[in-house]
Image: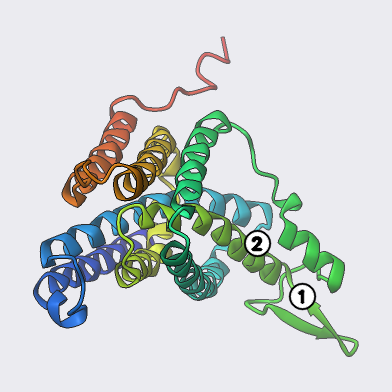
Amino acid sequence: EVKMKEALTWSAIWIGIACAFGAALYFYWPTIQPNSAYTPAQATQSYFAGYLIEKALSVDNIFVFLLLFTYFQVPAAYQHRVLFWGIIGALIFRTIFIAAGAALLEKFFWTMIIFGLFLIFTGIKMVVMKDKEMDPSKNPMVKLINRIMPVTKEYHGQKFFVNIDGKRWATPLFVCLMAVEFTDVIFAVDSIPAIFAITSDPFIVLTSNVFAILGLRALFFALAGLMKLFHYLSYGLAAILVFVGGKMLYNYMEKVVYPEWAKFDVGLSLGIIATILIASIVASILKPPANKDHGAAA
């Protein structure tokens, strides 16, 4: 079981590594991407903007992971194993998504309109459906596994599979892992287009994603007990999605329809995203969530 102090330490280490990579990007960008149209400053700002978006949206992931662990009653001692393999899967799937997204935007630039409208819709939906509870039993991956193979009712240590009477059974831990993987794929559909709104460079999109995800396991254990305090964060994330969706539409108009329009500065994007994120966290701290049980007993 990962303790709070250890989780905070590792979170700080992963954030430090991500920041160090961003600094290295500034000095070595001409070597890494010699033919890039980006200056070292633009590349670094794009990386940090992408990292900040992915890190912010990964916090929303933690809400869902907590719900899944509670639903499947995953013992605290086994949660780190699910998160470890979940992150490995996330890195693989996101690499595929980023490669596909980059190829799509390069060949069919008009898809930026679709991505932009989708992000705006997702941001609005996040606010409208804020209080709607997710039912893990309706997760398509959970339904699929229960349909194609038997699942034990009890846990068998950290095992994902066990052999019973010569037959291979999945354990609830494996079902939970698949639910986590499926959930991350759904979140990736939001986060990856959001980063493409900042930069179309696949290297920057991939590295900002990778460094944000690598610290997700430590971040989960660091924030798991504090998530309810950040009750305004979902509004901040929704605002970020609407902003980057709007920026995607602006980028398309500027490049295709109105070339005389000024380019949207990457540094400005980074500042707006950081401001929205900080404001939602500060608002959560200044105005704690109302205690629903307050005054119940009279």
Q: Where residue 253 sits: x, y (%)?
A: 35, 43
- Residue at image coords 18%, 44%: 268
Determine which residue is flagged by label 2.
179
Q: Is residue 104 visible?
A: yes
Q: Is residue 96 left or right of residue 18?
A: right
Relative vertical location of residue 294 with respect to residue 166 in this rendering, above or below: above
Q: Which residue is mark 1?
A: 170
Q: Quadrant of residue 155?
A: bottom right
- Can you say whether 232 is above or below 209 in the image? above
- Tell me where residue 51 sits by quadrant: bottom left
Q: Secondary structure at mark 1?
A: strand
Residue at point 30%, 29% (across, down)? 283
Residue drawn at 65 percent across, 67 percent down: 178
User: Which percent across, then down, holds residue 4?
Assistant: 36, 59
Residue type highlighted by circle 1: Ala
70 versus 102 height, above or below? above
Query: Could you tell whether 71 is left or right of 190 in the image?
Result: right
- Looking at the image, which residue is at 15% across and 82% down? 31
Circles 2 and 1: CB atoms closer than 8 Å: no
